[in-house]
Amino acid sequence: MKVSYHGHSVVQIQVNGKRIIIDPFIRGNQLTDLRVEDVNPDVILLTHGHNDHVGDTVELAKKNNALVIANHEISTFLGWQGVNTHGMHIGGAHQFDFGKVKLTQAFHGSSYETENQELVYCGMPAGILFMAEGKTIYHAGDTGLFSDMKLIGERHPIDLAFLPIGDNFTMGPEDAAYAAKLLGAKTIVPIHYNTFPPIKQDPNQFIDMLENKNGKVLGAGEFIEL
């Protein structure tokens, strides 16, 4: 399994012959190495409805006939736009042919701003557990620190966790370091930082805060093999 990071909260997974992308915010993301024209996912996973996470989902899904997996409200909203979706919700899991997906809680907001400056309610935000080939990846989405991260790690031993560190809208480095301790993941990768002025952070300082010294900063396009 190849897992790569592409700026902000964008993560790609290649597994079982499938190309999966999480939160494909590409256009407008100055930190990504991706171009929408070159991205050809089979599956899109979404943590919540904010524009910097839904990103280019509709275009990518229609162009590639990709399956979008998200909570029920986002799936319904995107389904109205002609997108192929599979709706889920927090605590629920589903076994797909490429792997198992489970949604966890996250503490944040979730709405989508249309071009007419209307806010569409997008249900509860979520984190994502992805399980395949005997490995477990946790993408926390946008969230603050919460104690049940310990239960998530105990119930689903995590090989690789992506945690937001930007502060202001999500956990900052200190809380994210404590989240890493609760989760007990083998490897921690920081996400959701430096994209906008309010979330400027030094990811290497975050890595230094980790009690188990098990962090890795990934540049856009860099990857980890599991």
Image (cartoon, rainbow, N blue to C red):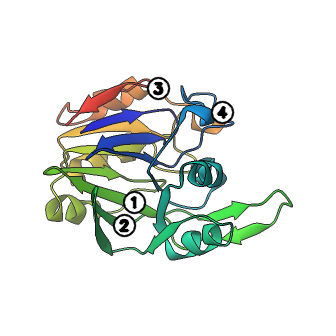
Estimate how packed mark 1 is, as few (under 14), some (14 to 19) or many (20 or more) residues with alpha carbons within 10 Å. many
> Label 4 is placed on what type of residue?
Pro
- Which residue has dot 3 on it? 220
Q: Nearer the viewer, residue 196 or 133?
A: 133
Q: CA distance from mark 3 to mark 1?
A: 21 Å
Q: CA distance from mark 2 to mark 3?
A: 25 Å
- Disc nearer the start of the sequence (4/3): 4
Q: Nearer the viewer, mark 4 or mark 2?
A: 2
- Which residue has dot 1 on it? 127
Tell me the SS state at disc 4: helix
Residue 118, quarter of the rendered image:
bottom right
- Disc nearer the start of the sequence (2/1): 2
Q: Nearer the viewer, mark 4 or mark 3?
A: 3
Tell me if label 3 and label 1 are in contact, CB under 8 Å.
Answer: no
- Disc nearer the start of the sequence (4/2): 2
Estimate how packed mark 4 is, as few (under 14), some (14 to 19) or many (20 or more) residues with alpha carbons within 10 Å. few
- In the rendering, which numbered label is found on residue 197? 4
Tell me if label 4 and label 3 are in contact, CB under 8 Å.
Answer: no
Q: Nearer the viewer, mark 3 or mark 1?
A: 3
> Label 1 is placed on what type of residue?
Gly
Residue 185 in view, yes or no: yes
Determine the residue positioned at 30% across, 71% down: 94
- In the rendering, which numbered label is found on residue 103? 2
Question: Height in image: 162 above or below 148?
Answer: above
Task: Where is residue 121? Give x, y as percent.
Answer: 66, 73
Determine the residue positioned at 61% across, 71% down: 79
Tell me the SS state at disc 3: loop
Question: Height in image: 200 above or below 86?
Answer: above
Estimate how packed mark 2 is, as few (under 14), some (14 to 19) or many (20 or more) residues with alpha carbons within 10 Å. many
- Disc nearer the start of the sequence (4/1): 1
